[in-house]
């Protein structure tokens, strides 16, 4: 393909993309993967979350009870989270990371970083 043709096809693709974003509006911003875990009813929801390397995961406590987020390997540890408090951790390496609430050890969850 010649450079001119290549540029023309890029321009055409751009028009298509602009058309799409015009149609879809703000929904374009929703392509980011969810990296949030809600702590509710003494459970991490979702219990298992898969994210890309470099993602920051945020836990938010929506219970009336305090909870914590503690990595089984000791990689991260939140303070006690009161209602609506959040804790974030950035995962720079691929792997499987399990965590618990240190106050309620039956509360377990898992982050899979790919
Ligand atoms: Cu707890």
Image: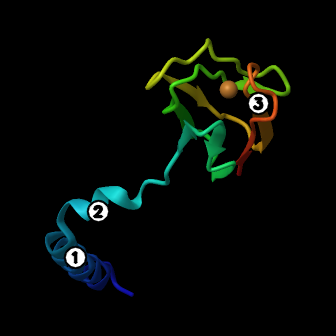
Please name the residue shown 81% across and 28% down the image. Answer: 105
Image side of residue 95 versus residue 17, left or right? right
Query: Quadrant of residue 108 in the image?
Result: top right
For residue 28, the mark is 2
The spot of residue 8 in percent (x, y) is 23, 82
In the foreground, 114 or 108: 108
Task: Kindly identify which residue carries mark 3.
Answer: 100
First in sequence, mark 2 or 1: give its number.
1
First in sequence, mark 3 or 1: give its number.
1
Image side of residue 31 versus residue 86, left or right? left
On the rendering, which quadrant does ligand 1 occupy? top right
Q: Which mark lies nearer to you, 3 or 2?
A: 3
**Around disc 2, counting alpha carbons within 10 Å, would you say few (fewer than 14), some (14 to 19), or many (20 or more)?**
few
**Around disc 3, counting alpha carbons within 10 Å, would you say few (fewer than 14), some (14 to 19), or many (20 or more)?**
many
| As drawn, 95 above or below 18 | above
Residue behind label 2 places its C-beta within 8 angstroms of ligand 1: no
| As drawn, 19 above or below 38 | below
Question: How far apart are the two marked residues, 3 and 2, measured between alpha carbons?
Answer: 34 Å
The spot of residue 114 in percent (x, y) is 71, 51
The spot of residue 86 in percent (x, y) is 49, 25
Task: Kindly identify which residue carries mark 1.
Answer: 20
Image side of residue 12 versus residue 80, left or right? left
């Amino acid at each position: 393909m010649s450079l001119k043709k290549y540029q023309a096809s890029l321009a055409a693709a751009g028009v298509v993309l602009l058309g799409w974003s015009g149609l879809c509006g703000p929904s374009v911003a929703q392509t980011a993967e969810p990296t949030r875990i809600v702590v509710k009813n003494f459970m991490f929801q979702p219990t298992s979350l898969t994210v890309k390397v470099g993602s920051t995961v945020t836990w938010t406590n929506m219970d009336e009870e305090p909870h914590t987020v503690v990595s089984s390997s000791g990689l991260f540890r939140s303070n006690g989270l009161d209602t609506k408090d959040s804790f974030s951790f950035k995962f720079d390496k691929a792997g499987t990371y399990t965590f618990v609430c240190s106050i309620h050890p039956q509360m377990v969850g898992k982050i899979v970083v790919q």
